[in-house]
Amino acid sequence: MALDLEVNGKRVSVDADAATPLLWVLRDDLKLTGTKFGCGAAQCGACTVHVDGEAVRSCVLPIAAAVGRKVTTIEGLSSAVGKALSQAWIEEDVPQCGWCQTGQIMSAAVLVAEKATPSDADIDACMSGNVCRCATYVRIRRAIHSAAAIAKGGGR
């Protein structure tokens, strides 16, 4: 069945079963491989994307639920907040293996867009659904604080 979506600001049509998880449509049909498969049960956060500006787990979201909504993947995260997060992630040397990082950044982007100066508690609450096997949580928190400052124009 052909389904029409808006992904990263572009209209696309995919031929997929309506129950297919969004993750597999993004990766297999649209070749947007920045979104990662982690657990397949919405527990690790590696597959996080934005749907209408909200962080969602694409491994369990049926593609039919994304029809008529705006989907943003890591490849389309071009906002000032996205750029600030990218800069901060590099400056804080966050990734080790890197598998979870796109999901971490996508979750952090929603937080920083909604809260100009997130507290440690805000960060912990927002990021609690994102698992990092390498345990770079301290660097992730520092990077989110740094990105918030950069996004406000204050730099580090």
Image: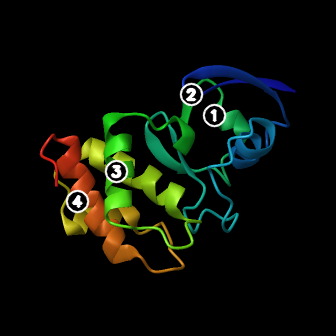
Give the foreground label among 3 and 4. Answer: 3
Q: Which of labels 2 and 4 is toward the front?
A: 4
Tag 2: residue type? Answer: Arg
Q: Which mark is residue 143?
A: none
Name the residue nearer the viewer: 133 or 52: 133
Q: Position of residue 68 (x, y in %)?
A: 61, 23
Crowd band around label 3 with a 10 angstrom C-alpha radius: few (<14), some (14–19), many (20+): some
Q: Which residue is mark 4?
A: 145
Residue 48 position, x and y percent, is 55, 53
N-terminal label among 1 and 4 = 1
Q: Farthest residue to the left: give it.
A: 154
Which residue is under mark 3?
Answer: 87
Please say if the residues under marks 1 and 4 sit with CB atoms less than 8 Å apart: no
Query: What amino acid type is highlighted by mark number 3?
Result: Gln
Q: CA distance from mark 3 to mark 4?
A: 12 Å
Characterize the local packing of mark 2: few (<14), some (14-19) or many (20 or more) Cα atoms within 10 angstroms: some
CA gap, disc 2 and disc 4: 30 Å
Q: Nearer the viewer, mark 2 or mark 3?
A: 3
Image quadrant containing the N terminus? top right
Residue occupying the point 36% across, 42% down:
83
Q: To which residue does mark 1 refer?
A: 66
* C-beta proximity under 8 Å, tags 2 and 1: yes
Camera-near label (1 vs 4) is 4
Q: Earlier in the sequence, mark 3 or mark 1?
A: 1
Reading the image, the residue beneath label 2 is 69
